[in-house]
Image (cartoon, rainbow, N blue to C red):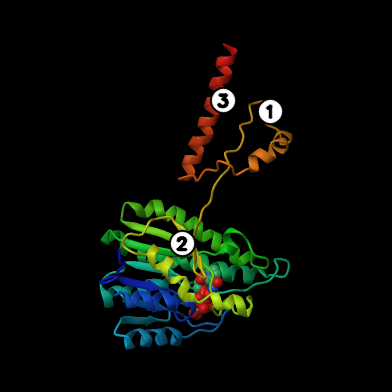
């Protein structure tokens, strides 16, 4: 099965370098018309120009591909609406949105200003919501859309010194989970990638030997699979250094505490069983969890009534 993007129009945010550039080049090589968004700022999000985006456009055109540059800032909903208007004027539709733009302002929480916290959440979480909101109507109207969120191991597992970044990246898993349901009836599939790659962003965090394995190109296959025609939905793939794995949120089966035994001490006593992930459950939706706990309560009460009878 070959995955083609012929006649598909893609927007990649933050595509002036790193992973976004790698996604854009491969999308174009597979036939997509690509909008290269990048506001061209520094790693902490200051400054900005459309030069980085224009460079990638030149690269794509040199190989015979179609691309346009956009210097919009994802933190501005107006910029994202303008980006969408330009894309529709130029290419007539929008099939794929890869939310990739990002910045870092690492510090321990003790030393982090609320401004640094907000700036990072603003680019990753609000920026992805802005771009997604801007394409949503066009995708709904055409009954087709593929949206990729860029999460991170920092968001789902945690990394020291990244409270702002981890919170934003976990938020993107939440956004994916909900938009999966809201987009389904319009043919919109929403997924997430959790990359590990040597880019400007990770430049000073990894040693030479690790950097060798971590070419951004190694993340591209998982990302493009998740925005292809036959993509699944609400799937989060970890990708880097040749490994592709699925990240999932599961809950333990837990314990049922009968009425009268619902105390903190009972929780402490059962904590081993509560924590055990043997037989863990991947819950399909928030309401499915409610159904499960109500069913547990009903079963336990019915059993108790039977014993009494
Ligand atoms: P990068 O720094 O090379 O690329 C990020 C791009 O986003 C830059 O070109 C920057 O100019 C652009 N950008 C930043 N703020 C913007 C804004 N407000 N509007 C428009 N463009 C903006 O970094 P990299 O590594 O390629 O990161 C891409 C994505 O992957 C980010 O979301 C990052 O958090 C995520 N990620 C990367 C990992 C890695 O190992 N490299 C690990 C986990 C996640």
What crowding class fits label 1: few (fewer than 14 Cα within 10 Å), some (14-19), or many (20 or more)? few
In whole angstroms, how far apart are the C-alphas of marks 1 and 3? 13 Å
Q: Residue 65: give x, y in percent of width and height.
A: 30, 82
Label 1 or label 2, whichever lies nearer to me, is 2
Residue labelled with disc 1: 261
Left or right: residue 297 versus residue 220 is right
> Crowding at label 2, few (<14), some or many (≥20) Cα neighbours within 10 Å?
many
Kindly identify the residue that appears in the image at 72 percent across and 70 percent down.
Answer: 111
> What separation in Å lies between label 3 and label 2 (alpha carbons)?
38 Å
Alpha-carbon span between mark 1 and mark 2: 41 Å
**For the residue labelled by badge 2, is the local secondary structure a helix, a strand or a loop?**
strand
Where's the C terminus, which quadrant? top right
Does the Cβ of the disc 2 residue fall within 8 Å of ligand 1? no
- Looking at the rendered structure, which numbered label has been put on residue 192? 2
Q: Earlier in the sequence, mark 1 or mark 3?
A: 1
- Up the image or down, 150 lies above or below 301; here it is below
- Can you see residue 198? no
Image disc number at residue 299: none
Dot 3 alpha-carbon crowd within 10 angstroms: few under 14, some 14 to 19, many 20 or more: some
**Residue 245 relative to residue 157: left or right:** left
Q: Earlier in the sequence, mark 3 or mark 2?
A: 2
Residue 1: % across, % down? 30, 63
Kindly identify which residue carries mark 3. 300
Going 56% across and 23% down the picture, which residue do you hit? 301
Q: Kindly tell me whether residue 185 is visible in this rendering.
A: yes
Q: Position of residue 28 (x, y in %)?
A: 33, 77
Residues at circles 1 and 2 in contact by the CB criterion of under 8 Å: no
In what element is the residue under mark 1? loop
Residue nearer the viewer, 257 or 204: 204
Image coordinates for residue 59, horizontal then vertical, percent: 37, 86
Name the element at disc 3. Answer: helix
């Amino acid at each position: 099965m070959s995955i083609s993007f012929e006649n598909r129009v893609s927007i990649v945010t933050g595509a002036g370098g790193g992973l976004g550039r790698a996604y854009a080049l491969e999308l174009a090589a597979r036939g997509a018309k690509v909008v290269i968004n990048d506001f061209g700022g520094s790693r902490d999000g200051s400054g900005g120009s459309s030069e980085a985006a224009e460079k990638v456009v030149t690269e794509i055109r040199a190989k015979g591909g179609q691309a346009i540059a956009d210097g919009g800032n994802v933190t501005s909903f107006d910029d994202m609406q303008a980006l969408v208007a330009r894309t529709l004027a130029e290419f007539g539709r929008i099939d794929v949105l890869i939310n990739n733009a990002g910045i870092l302002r690492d510090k321990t929480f003790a030393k982090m200003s609320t401004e640094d916290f907000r700036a990072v959440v603003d680019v990753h979480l609000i920026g992805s919501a802005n771009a997604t909101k801007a394409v949503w109507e066009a995708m709904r109207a055409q009954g087709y859309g593929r949206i990729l969120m860029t999460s991170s191991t920092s968001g789902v597992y945690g990394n020291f010194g990244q409270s702002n970044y981890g919170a934003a990246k976990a938020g993107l898993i939440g956004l994916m989970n909900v938009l999966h349901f809201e987009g389904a009836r319009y043919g919109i599939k929403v997924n997430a990638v959790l990359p590990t790659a040597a880019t400007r962003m990770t430049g000073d965090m990894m040693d030479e030997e690790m950097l060798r394995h971590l070419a951004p190109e190694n993340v591209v296959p998982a990302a493009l699979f998740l925005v292809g025609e036959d993509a699944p939905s609400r799937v989060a793939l970890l990708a880097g250094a040749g490994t592709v794995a699925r990240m999932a949120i599961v809950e333990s089966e837990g314990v049922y505490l009968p009425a009268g035994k619902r105390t903190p001490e009972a929780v402490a006593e059962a904590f081993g069983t509560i924590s055990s992930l043997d037989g863990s459950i991947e819950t399909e939706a928030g309401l499915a969890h409610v159904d499960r706990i109500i069913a547990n309560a009903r079963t336990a009460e019915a059993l108790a009534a039977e014993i009494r009878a």
